[in-house]
Amino acid sequence: MDLPRNLGLKGGRLWERERMGPWFHGGQSCSTAAEPGAPRAGPLCSILVGRFGCRATVMLGGVLASLGMVASSFCRSLGQLYLAAGFFTGLGLCFSFQSTITVLGFYFTRRRALANAVASVGVSLGITLWPLLARHLLEELGWRGTFLVFGGVFLHCCVCGAILRPVAPSVAPGAAPASRGGPPVPSKAPAPGRLAACGRATLRYLAFDILWHNAGYRVFTLGVTWMILGFPLPQVFLVPFAIRYGVDEHKAALLISIIGFSNIFLRPMAGLVAGRPDVARFRKYLFSLAVLLNGLTNLVCTVSANYRVLVGYCLVYSVSMSVVGALFFQVLMDVVPMDQFSRALGLCTILESISILLSPPMAGFVLDSTDSNFSYVFYMSSFFTVSSALFMGGGFCALQRKERQGRPAGAGAATPEAAIPEAAPLPALLGEDPGSSEKQPCTEEITYVTSV
């Protein structure tokens, strides 16, 4: 069965612009969690990172993503396209993306917010170039040739993974803490059966223990899961919305590029502001405020479809999007310890995947039910983002108030940046007594952190 016929369209180049064009435009808004393969990839990526390290996992992801794109160019049915471009490419992109974010948290300690913001500039570059490049390739090479080109692009993830600096074993994710008192004492408790051990390992890698015991992580994960139901919708439907109301196709595609180009400069600025010591303890509220602004901004599209108004909307939307993109992983690093970050990110990826798989079909159902009235799609996006912002902001505020009530009087509030210990002075590392001229080797364990 031919793919155009499977989509219910006649053959020719017209169907590529009708169906594959919006697919490529909407694809730039989907992160690794957006692909159908991602719901199963989060815990699997955590296992691979703990077993083989971030470098090998990134390279494996690049190979899978490239093979998925190349196989998509030979697909002849919609089911094959789902399997190749959806499952295998999504699986590979999730491996590369999650492993890179994990190793970034171990590279930096003092300036993690800025590091995350600068690293996410690559996403902004992709958002800027993707619509223009995809439309050009569709017109020149067709959809099969476009998939082949993107397969070659994704293969560069292997090069990026190969130049990653390995993390020291003492701080690598999944590394067991070293014992200071010699070999561990064998436990007298009976060893659990294989089925029970498998169940415990599964629950551990799914990070349900973190979700149950860490209230901050619970608020963040549930809020982000609800937010994702509406957050990607403007990027997916903005181009079709503008075209429907008379905007030229090339100008409509330029709207997405405006968002990406603005993010290139706004994300590092957001990282600089969020990395300041006096702002560090308010990062969670800044993130919630950015999500709230994002939801309120979407209401502009329900009022006017004028091109100048849409350009202004894209600029304001870029401000909120840049703050959300720059602080997303930093807030997650603030609410969970770094040795649990890989597992926590895996569970967050699972829940995001479920939300983003449900969001576009829900919006499509709304469009079909309202005779393609895009205003209801933007109303839907605003509802989910505004309600999630209020939930996260209120939840973080309640947790902070509860923490203050349980804290002894006179204890100062430590910021996430201040919680990082300073490097020990040289006499302390050598075990030198200040009152003695004799130097002795230090018997305490020293943990080294790889930095870039």
Image: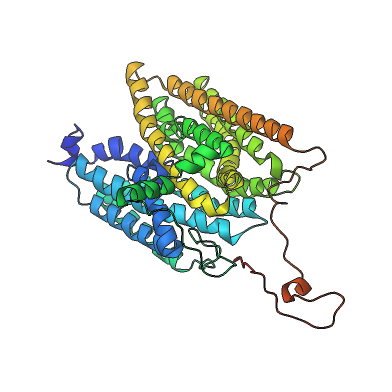
User: Image quadrant of residue 76?
Assistant: top left
Number of marks in the image? 0
Q: Which residue lies furthest to the top in this view?
A: 370
Q: Position of residue 66 (x, y in %)?
A: 32, 57
Is residue 58 placed above or below 237 in the rendered structure?
A: below
| Residue at x 41%, y 31% (from the top left corner) | 237
User: Image quadrant of residue 398?
Assistant: top right
User: Image quadrant of residue 65?
Assistant: bottom left
| Residue at x 37%, y 54% (from the top left corner) | 191
Q: Quadrant of the image for the N terminus? A: top left
Left or right for 268, reference 62: right
Task: Please state which of residues 402 and 162 is positioned toward the viewer in this rendering.
Answer: 402
Is residue 20 placed above or below 65 in the rendered structure?
A: above
Task: Please state which of residues 296 and 405 is positioned toward the viewer in this rendering.
Answer: 405
How are the residues colored? rainbow
Q: Can see residue 318?
A: no
Q: Where is residue 328 in the image (x, y as percent from the top left)?
A: 56, 43
Task: Please state which of residues 102 and 116 is positioned toward the viewer in this rendering.
Answer: 102
Q: Residue furthest left?
A: 1
| Residue at x 20%, y 51% (from the top left corner) | 74
Q: Position of residue 21 (x, y in %)?
A: 33, 40
Left or right for 226, reference 72: right
Q: Quadrant of the image for the C terminus? A: bottom right
Is residue 54 placed above or below 269 in the rendered structure?
A: below
Left or right for 27, reference 321: left
Q: Residue furthest bottom?
A: 438
Is residue 182 placed above or below 437 in the rendered structure?
A: above
